[in-house]
C-alpha cells in the first residue's frame, strides 16, 4: 500500500454542518483517535458538506427520493443523507446497510438522536446480499453512496446491483478513490472506477482532496442531459 493521506479537516466552523447532532459529535475532534470515537470511520469535513449539497441538489421536490448507502458504520453519513431529504422538503428515504451489528446499533442511536429516524431504514449484513432486498421491482435510486467494503470486486458488484435502478441523472458517490494500492495489490475503489468507466461510460468527477484514509471522493452520472438530443 502507498502512504496514507488525510484530507479530513478539524479546524472549521461546525455551524457549517447540516445537523445539530453531527455538530455535537464532531465538536471536539482534533485527531484520528477522537473522531473515530465520535463519528466513526466517517468521511468527515469537508466531505460531509460535499455529500450534503450534492444530494440536496439532486433531490426532486415532486418525487419520492430513494437514497442507497452501503457502509452505514455508526451513522454519520446516514445523518447527512437523511438531513438532505428533510431539507429538500420533498419525500424520500435512506436505505443503508452495515456488515457489523454493533455499528448498525450505534447508527440507529445516532440517527435517532439526530431526529431523522423516520426517514432511514437500516439493513444488516453484506451489502452484496442485502442490496437485492433494499432495491426491488422498479425502485429508482436518486443517489447511491457506496462506502462499505472498498475492495475492487465488492465495489464493482455493488455498482452492478444498483445500476439498473439508476436514471440518467442519478448520482453515484464513491469514497476512498485515491490510488492507494501498489500494482500487484487489490486495486480497490480506484481500480473499480476505471472499470466502471470502461464498461458503463458515464461522467466521472474525482474530488481528491477530501475525506480521510483513503481520501478522495468521486461522483458518477450516466447522462446528465438525458438522450442529448438538442431542443428543436
Ligand atoms: C468507511 S466505513 C463507512 C463510513 C460511513 N459511510 C460514514 O461516512 O459515516 C465502512 C463501513 O462499511 C462496513 N462494511 C465493510 N464491508 C462491508 C460489506 N461487505 N457490506 C456492508 N458493510 C460493510 C464496515 O463495517 C464499516 O462500518
Image (cartoon, rainbow, N blue to C red):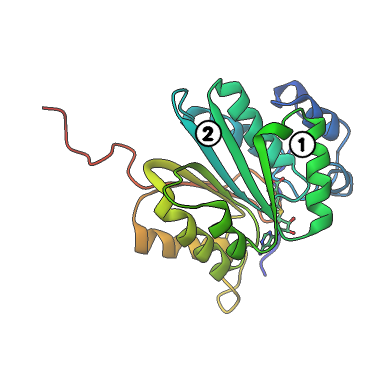
- Asked if residue 168 lies left or right of residue 206, the reply is left
Tell me the residue at 56%/61% (across/down).
189
Q: Which residue is mark 1?
A: 111
In-front residue for pair 181/171: 171
Can residue 151 be seen at all in this image of the molecule? yes
Residue 54, label in figure: 2
- Is there CB contact under 8 Å for labels 2 and 1? no
Q: Is mark 1 within 8 Å of ligand 1?
A: no
Tell me the residue at 51%/41% (across/down).
143
Residue 28, label in figure: none
Farthest residue in the bottom direction?
184
Mark 1 lies on a secondary structure that is helix
- Asked if residue 206 lies left or right of residue 99, the reply is left
Residue 150 image offset from top left, x and y in percent = 62, 62
Specify few, some or many for label 1: CA neighbours under 10 Å numbering under 14, 14-19, or 20 or more. Answer: many
Quarter of image, res 223? top left
Residue 92 image offset from top left, x and y in percent = 56, 32
**In the rendered image of this protein, does residue 187 appear above or below residue 165?**
below
**In the rendered image of this protein, does residue 156 appear above or below residue 142?**
below
| Disc nearer the start of the sequence (2/1) | 2
Distance from label 2 to label 1 (Cα)?
A: 20 Å
Specify few, some or many for label 2: CA neighbours under 10 Å numbering under 14, 14-19, or 20 or more. Answer: some
Farthest residue in the front direction?
137
Mark 2 lies on a secondary structure that is helix
Q: Ligand 1 sits in which quadrant?
A: bottom right
Residue 4 image offset from top left, x and y in percent = 71, 59
Amino acid at each position: 500500500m502507498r502512504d496514507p493521506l488525510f484530507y479530513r479537516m478539524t479546524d472549521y466552523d461546525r455551524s457549517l454542518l447540516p445537523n445539530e447532532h453531527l455538530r455535537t459529535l464532531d465538536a471536539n475532534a482534533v485527531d484520528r483517535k477522537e473522531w473515530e470515537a465520535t463519528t466513526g470511520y466517517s468521511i468527515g469535513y469537508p466531505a460531509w458538506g460535499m455529500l450534503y449539497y450534492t444530494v440536496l441538489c439532486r433531490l426532486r421536490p415532486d418525487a419520492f427520493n430513494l437514497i442507497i448507502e452501503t457502509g452505514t458504520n455508526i451513522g454519520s453519513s446516514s445523518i447527512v443523507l437523511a438531513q438532505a431529504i428533510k431539507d429538500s422538503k420533498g419525500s424520500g428515504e435512506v436505505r443503508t446497510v452495515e456488515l457489523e451489528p454493533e455499528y448498525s446499533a450505534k447508527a440507529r442511536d445516532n440517527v435517532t438522536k439526530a431526529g431523522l429516524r423516520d426517514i432511514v431504514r437500516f439493513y444488516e449484513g453484506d451489502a452484496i446480499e442485502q442490496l437485492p432486498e433494499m432495491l426491488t421491482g422498479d425502485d429508482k435510486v436518486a443517489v447511491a453512496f457506496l462506502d462499505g467494503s472498498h475492495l475492487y470486486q465488492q465495489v464493482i458488484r455493488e455498482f452492478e446491483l444498483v445500476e439498473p435502478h439508476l436514471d440518467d441523472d442519478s448520482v453515484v458517490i464513491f469514497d476512498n478513490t485515491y490510488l492507494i494500492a501498489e500494482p500487484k495489490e487489490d486495486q480497490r475503489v480506484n481500480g473499480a472506477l476505471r472499470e466502471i468507466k470502461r464498461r458503463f461510460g458515464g461522467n466521472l468527477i474525482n474530488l481528491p482532496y477530501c475525506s480521510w484514509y483513503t481520501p478522495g471522493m468521486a461522483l458518477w452520472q450516466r447522462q446528465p442531459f438525458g438522450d442529448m438530443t438538442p431542443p428543436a
